[in-house]
């Protein structure tokens, strides 16, 4: 599970049923394909920027070019992410988090252009995994990856936010309101509560 703040920074990471070598500065972990036994928490720096534009042609041509660029970018990110999950490639957790956020960012924009709704993107599925997504009113983004056959975990992610994140992080006077510098969420009560909750889910045993 990843939590990204409104500045596009991954402030929390924890996985289950995933064993892999440690990445630099991460202490292990990766995308939680099939939600486990081992868990780790880390935070990262780095932001994902939107499309930068760049053409002085007509608005119609510029819009079409941006759409094609966005679609190509999304396709490339999805291909890379799917390759990581299917081949079990060992990459740095910071780079993995950036890639995950890039996919979410691109798909949200793509769905918004098609449907006109910011809440249109809920999840996406490949033959190897399913990405579940929930965004809070304050801009926090909760992402969890599971086996492709798992039902929607949107409400589960919402419960993690309302029951645990708000309780142990937001209400904690010692927790920073902004995670500048990539310090991330470092709260053992939150981590233990989420771990216990996830292990009670039917998807955990499936």
Image (tube, rainbow, N blue to C red):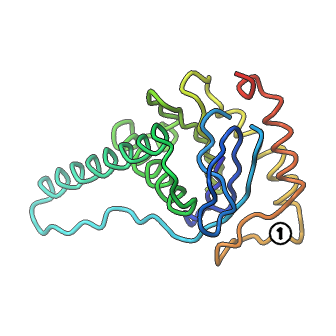
For the image, the number of numbered tags is 1
Q: Quadrant of the C terminus?
A: top right
- Residue 34's spot in the image, x, y percent? 63, 32
Q: Which residue is the extreme one toward the bottom?
A: 181
Look at 59% across and 46% down and name the residue there: 31
Residue 114 lies in quadrant: top left
Q: In the picture, residue 21 is in which quadrant?
A: bottom right
Which one is in front, 174 or 25? 25
Q: Position of residue 24 (x, y in %)?
A: 60, 68
Relative vertical location of residue 71 with respect to residue 7 in this rendering, above or below: above
Q: Position of residue 63 (x, y in %)?
A: 20, 53
Q: Residue at the spot x=76%, y=63% of the render?
A: 185
**Residue at image mark 1:** 175
Q: In the rendered view, tell whether residue 161 sits above or below residue 62.
A: above
Front position in the image: 116 or 80: 80
Q: Position of residue 98 (x, y in %)?
A: 50, 59
Q: Residue at x 78, y 36 (%)?
A: 198
Most extreme residue toward the front is 21
Q: At 44% from the left edge and 30% from the top edge, which residue is drawn?
A: 126
Q: Secondary structure at mark 1?
A: loop
Asked whether, in this view, residue 144 is left or right of residue 205, the answer is left
Foreground pick, 89 / 74? 89
Left or right of 57, for residue 158: right
């Amino acid at each position: 599970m990843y939590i990204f703040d409104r500045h596009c920074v991954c402030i929390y990471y924890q996985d289950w049923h995933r064993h892999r070598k440690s990445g630099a500065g991460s202490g292990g972990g990766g995308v939680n394909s099939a939600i486990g036994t081992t868990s780790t928490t880390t935070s990262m720096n780095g932001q994902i920027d939107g499309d930068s534009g760049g053409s002085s042609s007509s608005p119609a041509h510029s819009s079409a070019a941006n759409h094609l660029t966005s679609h190509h970018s999304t396709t490339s990110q999805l291909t890379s992410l799917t390759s990581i999950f299917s081949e079990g490639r060992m990459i740095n957790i910071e780079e993995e988090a950036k890639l995950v956020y890039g996919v979410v960012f691109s798909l949200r924009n793509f769905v918004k252009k098609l449907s006109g709704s910011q809440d249109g993107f809920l999840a996406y599925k490949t033959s190897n995994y399913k990405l579940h997504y929930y965004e809070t009113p304050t801009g926090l983004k909760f992402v969890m990856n599971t086996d492709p056959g798992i039902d929607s975990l949107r409400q589960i992610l919402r419960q993690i936010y309302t029951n645990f994140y708000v309780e142990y992080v937001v209400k904690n006077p010692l927790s920073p309101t902004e995670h500048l510098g990539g310090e991330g969420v470092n709260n053992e009560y939150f981590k233990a509560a989420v771990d216990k909750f996830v292990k009670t889910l039917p998807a955990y045993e499936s």
